[in-house]
Image (spheres, grey):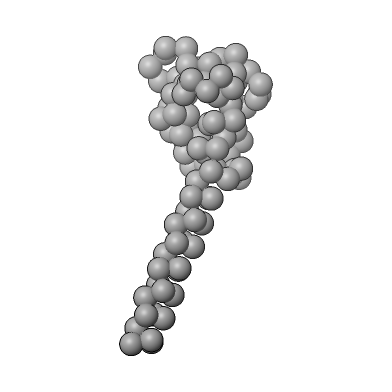
């Protein structure tokens, strides 16, 4: 009985550790989500051209990344631009 409890506790602790690592990775510096949040200075869920101008690479790519031409990047547009940047052979995101 003690062995079964030990196994269950060990599995639960392992799952909690894995969940914690996943959450940490999603919000860590270098992740696209963290980067989006760092550019979104006013925390409105969008990156304006003024916010993008603080990064030369993002400012240059802004017109192409703004696929719907509304003058701002939403998270989906930003993540798509980062994915495209990485697919084109950039070593890590330039953003």
16 or 77: which is nearer to us?
16
Residue drawn where x is 54% and y is 31% of the image: 37
8 or 88: which is nearer to us?
8
Q: Is residue 12 visible?
A: yes
Q: Position of residue 65 (x, y in %)?
A: 47, 24
Residue drawn where x is 48% and y is 42% of the image: 87
Query: Residue 34, located in which quarter of the rendered image?
Result: top right
Q: Quadrant of the C terminus?
A: top right
Q: Relative to 17, is 83 above or below?
A: above
Q: Position of residue 29 (x, y in %)?
A: 61, 43
Count of numbered tags: 0
Q: Relative to 60, is 9 above or below?
A: below
Residue drawn where x is 59% and y is 22% of the image: 41
Q: Quadrant of the N terminus?
A: bottom left
Q: Position of residue 43 (x, y in %)?
A: 52, 23
Residue found at the far front of this picture:
1
Q: Position of residue 20 (x, y in %)?
A: 49, 56
Q: Is residue 61 visible?
A: no
In the picture provided, is 19 more to the left or to the right than 35? left
Query: Residue 68, located in which quarter of the rendered image?
Result: top left
80 or 7: which is nearer to us?
7
In the picture provided, is 25 more to the left or to the right than 7? right
Q: Relative to 90, is 13 above or below?
A: below
């Amino acid at each position: 009985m003690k062995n079964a409890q030990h196994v269950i506790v060990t599995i639960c602790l392992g799952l909690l550790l894995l969940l914690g690592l996943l959450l940490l990775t999603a919000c860590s510096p270098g992740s696209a989500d963290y980067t989006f949040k760092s550019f979104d200075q006013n925390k409105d869920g969008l990156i304006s051209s003024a916010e993008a101008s603080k990064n030369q690479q993002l400012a240059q790519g802004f017109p192409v990344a703004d696929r719907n031409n509304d003058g701002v990047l939403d998270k989906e547009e930003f993540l798509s631009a980062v994915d495209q940047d990485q697919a084109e052979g950039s070593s890590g995101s330039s953003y």
